[in-house]
Amino acid sequence: MSISLKNRSLISISDYTPEEICHVLDIAEDFEKNPHQNLLNGRIIASLFFEPSTRTRLSFETAIQLLGGNVIGFSSTSGTSIQKGESLADTITMVASYADLIVMRNPIEGSARFASEVSKVPIINAGDGANQHPTQCMLDLYSIRKTQGTLKDLEITLVGDLKYGRTVHSLVEAMCNFNAKFNLVSPVELKLPSVVKQHIKDANLEYNQYTELEDAIPHSDIIYMTRIQRERFPDPEEYERVKNSYVLRNYMLEDSKPNCRVLHPLPRVNEIHVDVDANPKAYYFQQAQNGVYARQALIASILGLK
Amino acid sequence: MEKRKELIVSAIENGTVIDHIPADKVFQVVKILGLEKVSNPIYFGTNLESKKYGSKGIIKISDKFFKPEEINKVALVAPTASLIEIKDYEVVNKQTVNVPEKIEHIVKCFNPNCITNKEHDVPTKFTLVKDAKGETKLHCHYCEKNTSLDQLEFI
């Protein structure tokens, strides 16, 4: 049976089956080979960013332009009727009458799911607070498959803020479909929440918790570094205590597997030292570039053009 | 004691008796069932003696019968409650309550940053899940966070 994602909003990565995810990755691969494809042919995509974003917004807008589409929207709520107190339902209903697809980032958790229920056009969640960021997950999966040749049977080491990092939660959930083994490296305060560990247990997969990053590196296929986010800590002292817990240095990769790659959703602060950047195993900038292809693939699939 | 129990259960001619409510949950059950808006005669008792639970509460509502999905909401705060339906002073149905799979509109999401707490007119929707420790929790359809049963705040 052929896979169609036409008119299917993407709010959480679990909205799509593993087969549908792989279908999107296949299309992304095609876009990487041939990014300029005038599939949208002037169609209008709304890009509603209720909070600032650099990579996500720019890569979505790049993806839309590579597809020959036009973008309407805003990159902050300043000057919009949201500041006058307009409800999200009203904003979405109005924009849905202008655009063929809505890409939305909103700091309120659950806003994307709600938007998909009131909108007559599909919604792509570009991040709803600390909840979900499924297009980041899609590009992470694309980067993993591209560098490893498969998504199956890989050993993934997740490092840093495993408690608040939404990209980590989505990645664990998605990789549970592909028989992954997880290594969890975090300060005690930032351990993976039990609800996410439950996904690993439900899938009968293995995970190990490490306090030393060096112990997990030699057997890792993917090292997924994350930033410890200052804004998540109500107590600045606690942030100061844990912020430099894990810093990846180039020498630490000496014993890593030849296929090992270092990923990071970016922005980084100091958790990956710049001396890693020249190492061929550093993949985070290509990973960000892959975001364009993954988003092209999603837009084209959801609009039924691929 | 047995005689007195009979009297409590059958004191209404027709209607519903909710028995074995934890004594401190009677008013939450009233709220969940929206009984404050009902014009039928309603009788409450609480801090009554219970052989099984030490103390209990009871609510009797005349001439009113509930759908299973309505009455099962009671299990959120009173999992020990039993439902007794009375017709012509006779017990015609007696059953325990079961926590429903879906809970809508009646409890708040504990996450202050959830859309249901930020925007007016976004009703709460939860499904029942078990966490890693086997504890029953309410999983928010919108923000995907879990609310514990002991954190429940009614709307």
Image (cartoon, rainbow, N blue to C red):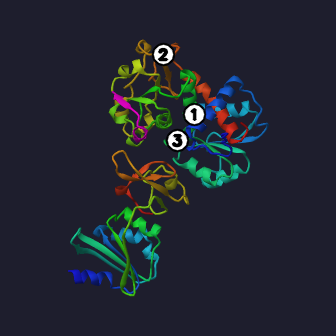
Indicate which disc, 2 or 3, sits on the residue closer to the N terminus: 3
Indicate which disc, 3 or 1, sits on the residue closer to the N terminus: 3
Return the residue nearer the eye: B70 or B124.
B70
Q: Which mark is residue A132?
A: 3
Indicate which disc, 2 or 1, sits on the residue closer to the N terminus: 1
Whether residue A240 is visible, yes or no, is no
Q: Quadrant of residue A294?
A: top right
Q: Identify the residue under disc 2.
A: A276
The magenta stretch is: A198-210
Q: Residue at horizontal 55%, vertical 21%? A: A147
Residue B95: x and y, percent?
Answer: 37, 71
Q: Residue at horizontal 58%, vertical 30%? A: A139
Query: CB atoms at circles 2 and 3 under 8 Å apart?
Result: no
Q: Residue furthest right?
A: A41
Residue B141: x and y, percent?
Answer: 50, 52
Three-letter code, disc 2: Val
Residue A200 within the segment the image draws in magenta: yes
Q: A218 above or below A107?
A: above
Q: Identify the residue under disc 1.
A: A138
Q: Chain of mark 3?
A: A
Return the residue nearer the eye: A193 or B36.
A193
Q: Residue at horizontal 29%, vertical 82%? A: B8
